[in-house]
Amino acid sequence: MPFTLKKAELDEEFLKGAKSRGMIQLKGHRSVGGMRASIYNAMPVEGVKTLVDYMKEFEAKHG
């Protein structure tokens, strides 16, 4: 699932915060930019919830 932030200059901060919460490999493909999350069948529901919670927290702070 690819996604971008409204302000691309916040990408690194988003990725750093995600990493500090144990979420890695979210950086998007170099030709597309932004982020991408792998939320396929093998991804535990808890991991998806963690990402959603972090996204909401980041939005509240930077939205």
Image (tube, grey):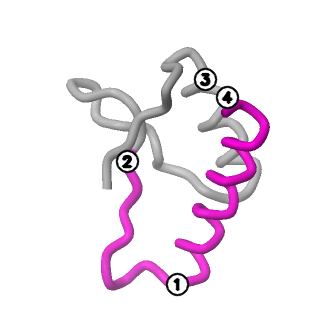
Binning the other alpha carbons within 10 Å of mark 3 as few (below 14), some (14 to 19) or many (20 upward) gives some
Image coords of residue 33 (percent x, y) = 33, 27
Q: Amino acid at mark 2?
A: Arg
Q: Earlier in the sequence, mark 2 or mark 3?
A: 3
SS at badge 2:
strand
Image coords of residue 7 (percent x, y) = 53, 20
| Front position in the image: 36 or 5 | 5
Task: Answer above or below: position of 45 versus 35.
Answer: below
SS at badge 1:
helix
Q: Residue at x 31, y 75 (%)?
A: 40
* Residue indicated by mark 1: 45
The residue range painted magenta reads 36-63
Instruction: Tell whether label 4 touches label 3 (CB within 8 Å).
Output: yes
* Residue indicated by mark 4: 13
Q: Quadrant of the C terminus?
A: top right
Is residue 47 one of those drawn in magenta? yes
* Residue indicated by mark 2: 36
* Residue indicated by mark 3: 10
Q: CA distance from mark 3 to mark 4?
A: 5 Å
* Number of marks in the rendered image: 4
Q: Amino acid at mark 3?
A: Leu
Is residue 55 one of those drawn in magenta? yes
Residue 23's disc is none
